[in-house]
């Protein structure tokens, strides 16, 4: 199920270049590297005009709740080990790196959810009906469209 959802998502033409979850994994990396959600230590082009960032007591912070960035810490740690990062070696924000990480994490989470849905459906339904239910859930709800594109608060 993981590979089906991830492969389908990679081939889909859906793309949202900037959105609310932008900078959430940068916040995760800041927590991992510097033990603070403050983003002051990174060079972020356009930070002053970004609605996702806010200044508070001399610190630059991700505006939205930090539950998502905290939840993503283990995923970000693994992806950092694999060479993916929201920060380039010069300490500058890497938009493409963050979006790639977000898509991978979101696709993994949603395919895990789909696998759980198959398992639960199999408790009550036949294999055919279970698969039909999961396909309808994946492609008929936000699981594939919105959720698989980034780490929204409800992902």
Image (cartoon, helix red, strand yellow):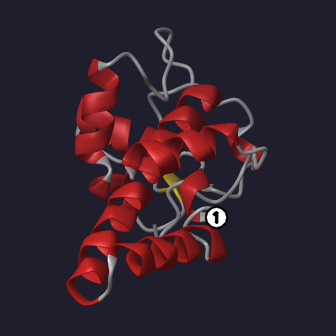
Q: Is residue 121 left or right of residue 22?
A: left
Q: Secondary structure at mark 1?
A: loop
Compared across the picture, whether 138 is left or right of 119 comes to right
Residue 102: give x, y in percent of width and height.
50, 44
**Picture layout, residue 136 above or below residue 2:** below
Q: Which residue is found at the position 46% from the left and 66% from the top? A: 155
| Residue 141 or residue 35, whichever sits in front | 141
Residue 140, quarter of picture: bottom right
Image location of residue 74, percent across then percent down: 22, 43
Q: Is residue 59 visible?
A: no
Q: Residues within 10 Å of mark 1 (few under 14, many from 20)?
A: some
The residue positioned 44% from the left and 28% from the top of the image is 41
25 in relation to 134, above or below: above
Could you say where residue 26 lies in the image, as x and y percent from the top left?
46, 39
Q: Nearer the viewer, residue 128 or 44?
A: 128
Residue 131 occupies quadrant: bottom left
Residue at x-position 71% and y-position 58%: 51
Quadrant assignment, res 68: bottom left
Relative height, residue 120 to residue 116 (above, below): below
Residue sitting at 54 percent across and 69 percent down? 135
Residue at the extreme top? 90
Instruction: Count numbered badges in the picture.
Output: 1
Residue lying at the far bottom in this picture: please name it: 124
Residue 97, can we see it? yes
Q: Position of residue 32 (x, y in %)?
A: 25, 36
Is 22 in front, or is 8?
Answer: 8
Q: Which residue is mark 1?
A: 146
Q: Nearer the viewer, residue 53 or 104?
A: 104
């Amino acid at each position: 199920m993981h590979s089906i959802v991830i492969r389908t998502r990679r081939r889909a033409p859906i793309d949202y270049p900037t959105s609310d979850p932008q900078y959430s994994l940068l916040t995760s990396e800041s927590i991992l590297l510097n033990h603070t959600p403050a983003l002051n230590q990174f060079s972020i082009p356009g930070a002053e005009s970004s609605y996702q960032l806010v200044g508070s007591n001399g610190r630059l912070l991700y505006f939205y709740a930090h539950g998502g960035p905290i939840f993503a810490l283990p995923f970000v740690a693994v992806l950092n080990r694999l060479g993916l990062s929201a920060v380039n070696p010069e300490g500058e924000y890497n938009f493409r790196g963050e979006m790639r990480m977000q898509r991978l994490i979101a696709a993994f989470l949603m395919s895990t959810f789909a696998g759980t849905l198959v398992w639960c459906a199999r408790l009550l339904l036949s294999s055919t009906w279970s698969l039909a239910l999961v396909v309808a859930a994946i492609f008929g709800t936000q699981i594939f469209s919105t959720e698989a594109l980034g780490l929204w608060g409800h992902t």
